[in-house]
Amino acid sequence: MFELLKRRVNGMPGQFRSNVWDPLLIVAQIVCMQCFYYVNLGFWIFILDTIGRFDASVDQIFTQSDLGLYEDSGRTNLIAYALNSFTCALGLWFVVRRTKQCLDFSATVHLLHFIGCWIVSGHVPQTFWWWVTTLVCLTLMTVLGEFLCMRTELKAIPVTMGTKVDL
């Protein structure tokens, strides 16, 4: 999948991005970001559960009952979701590479997570802490992803007189 992304982005001579509608690239980026989201969330939950000596479970990813500030395990999961937002922002920087598209991909990742939670639990998430966590993590992921992508997009382009520079 990374080869497809590299070929699509690097195979465009003389311009940063193609203006051609490429649904295959978009779907590949969405799948890549969703995988990145769940792998990193699982990693952070595992690490923090191991440190806190809690029982690690895949249910922590899709259930809403273990989020909140009232129990240690809930606080641990909130921290895991926040750390996941930071690492997924790096994923946006690596996979998407466009400031304008960071909000789109962040919202898509969280929307698909919402649908996954709905399917696994059998009902729409209803707890206050699930919604607060999701909105804060969406905001963190978007803002940091935009910051990283903007820094890359605004790098100085080397221009020298008399020689051709391969961009």
Image: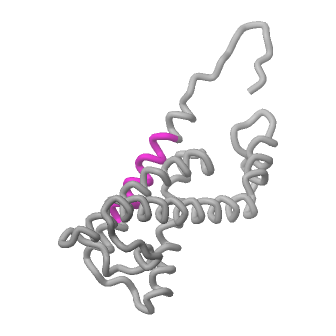
Task: Estimate the x, y position of residue 118 in percent, counting from the top left.
Answer: 45, 85
Q: How is the image coloured?
A: one colour
Q: 78 or 107: nearer the eye?
A: 78
Task: Estimate the x, y position of residue 8 in percent, counting from the top left.
Answer: 77, 49
Is 138 part of what is drawn in magenta?
yes
Residue 122 as seen in the image, left or right of residue 162? left
Task: Estimate the x, y position of residue 17 in percent, counting from the top left.
Answer: 70, 43
Residue visible at 28% across and 81% down in the picture: 127
Residue visible at 26% across and 65% down in the picture: 75
Residue 83 as seen in the image, left or right of residue 40? left
Task: Estimate the x, y position of residue 105 in percent, counting from the top left.
Answer: 54, 60
Q: 86 or 57: nearer the eye?
A: 57
- In this rendering, is residue 86 above or below 151? below
Is 23 part of what is drawn in magenta?
no
Residue 36 as seen in the image, left or right of residue 49? right
The segment highlighted magenta reads 135-148
Q: 108 or 161: nearer the eye?
A: 108
- In this rendering, is residue 165 above or below 83? above
Q: Quadrant of the N terminus?
A: bottom right
Q: Residue 22 occupies which quadrant of the picture?
A: bottom right
- In this rendering, is residue 74 above or below 154? below
Q: Main secondary structure of the magenta part?
A: helix
Number of disc labels: 0
Q: Quadrant of the C terminus?
A: top right
- In this rendering, is residue 113 above or below 14? below
Residue visible at 37% across and 67% down in the picture: 134
Work out which residue is located at the far bottom of the displayed protein and give it.
Answer: 122
Work out which residue is located at the far left of the displayed protein and give it.
Answer: 70
Q: 43 or 21: nearer the eye?
A: 43
Residue visible at 76% across and 19% down in the picture: 165
